[in-house]
Image (cartoon, grey):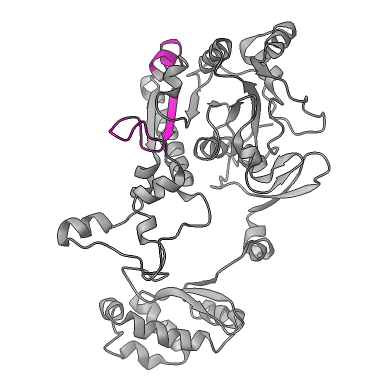
Amino acid sequence: MTSGPLEGLCVLELGSLIAGPFCTRLLADMGARVIKVEPPEGDPLRTWSMVTEHGSLWSMVQSRNKESVVIDLRRPEGQELARELAARVDVLVENFRPGRLESWGLDPDRLRERNPGLIVARISGFGQTGPYRDRPGFGSTGEALGGLRFITGFPDRPPLKVGVSLGDAVAALYATIGVLAALRRRHVTGRGEVVDVAIHESVFSLLESILPEYGHAGAVRERRGNGLMGSAPSNVYPTRDGRFIVIGANGDSIFRRFCRAMGVPGLADDPRFADNQSRRANVAELDALIERWTRAHDLDRIWQVLIEAEVPAAPVYSIADIVADPQYRARDMILRRPGPGDLGELLVPGVVPRFQEAPGGVRRLGGPPGEHTARVLGQLLGLGREEIVRLAAGSVVGLGPEPTPSAPDDGVDAAPAPGSR
């Protein structure tokens, strides 16, 4: 059965790869019924990262809790099926280049004529308006144009990317927030909404005080490695056993505790380090003193000393460290779910955020493309088996293998009327 605070909500996912499907993954984790429409060749994410004979592991996580329906949106009959589905759901999420939906007769205004309560979340590289509207854009280009890449890395080296698709993820989070806000407004007005999310704007919104600093003083923030711009000390420090620890002792009272933990309590009274502005002005010298201490001890010992001193600190974890950590296990952040075929049990990330009274969950991992085509078209559109077979024979839809009887199901037999939630 479904669970979570969004139970009863029905979402139609159009698009592929990262930002749009990540948004719907979050909605599905919180209990929404998500119908993922894929092209006949499947979402390209099925061939990204580590790929097994059953598809990519990333795709299995990204498509978890969703129902896969294969529809060829390039065909008129496929477009009509999408319009029919859009008339029966609460939310549509897409991440095509602007204009693609319109070229298929799926523009939001037309869809909302049939379904006034429909909320359409549109994620694109540069938004639905402006001179860059029609340009292709990915998370990487959004991170570059949004200003994040410029400040990431060390001053004597080229800009760096974070090791994950951060731009897409941030845009997906904003789209999720936009959908939830639009649902609240629909509860009051009965009207749907179009949520326009640009990846580069989503990234730009993370830049803290960089814009007012430039506007006020013409200051252009540059790359500074792992140090925190506004306060000190906050950095990554090497330890004796070849590992790294992050230490954030940048409050005055915390810094005093930190100095006692290092065995140099008088350092907190040194005029060079007595307050945050002084520490910032002398950060290189301060970091060198801290590194001398961390290099003299193993990481576990340093971490324990700083925990006892109530100084914020944490090891720089690998994924192996994360899996072994008791805090992750205690909060169900490392889940075990059966993989398809002979893959056995897979480790997948838990659900964020946690809800006390209506917790979300991972009911199933993403399966093969078209696994739920017949069920969704039958339940939501009332199509009979013969009509579905005819559409499949004409390559308008694709029929994957039927879900196995032992696979967890979402318990949904039919979608409620849009706007009734």
**Residue 405 falls in image quadrant:** top right
When the figure is inspected, residue 382 is found, relative to residue 68, above or below; the finding is: above
Point out residue 101 in the picture as x, y percentages from the top left corner: 45, 21
When the figure is inspected, residue 351 is found, relative to residue 182, above or below; the finding is: below
Residue at the image point whose x is 29% and y is 84% from the top: 274
Q: Nearer the viewer, residue 2 or 287?
A: 287
When the figure is inspected, residue 414 is found, relative to residue 284, above or below; the finding is: above
Residue at the image point whose x is 61% and y is 65% from the top: 318
On the rendered image, what quadrant is the N terminus found in? top right
Q: Nearer the viewer, residue 195 or 249?
A: 195
**Residue 289 falls in image quadrant:** bottom left
Point out residue 323 in the picture as x, y percentages from the top left corner: 67, 61
When the figure is inspected, residue 97 is found, relative to residue 139, above or below; the finding is: above
Q: Horizontally, is 385 left or right of 248 in the view? A: right
Q: Horizontally, is 347 left or right of 149 in the view? A: right
Q: Nearer the viewer, residue 360 or 60?
A: 60
**Can residue 118 be seen from the camera position used here?**
no
Q: Horizontally, is 85 left or right of 379 in the view? A: left
**Can residue 339 be seen from the camera position used here?**
yes
Q: Which residues are magenta?
A: 109-135
Point out residue 8 in the picture as x, y percentages from the top left corner: 57, 26
- State yes or no: residue 50 in magenta: no
Point out residue 26 in the picture as x, y percentages from the top left corner: 54, 39
**Residue 414 falls in image quadrant:** top right
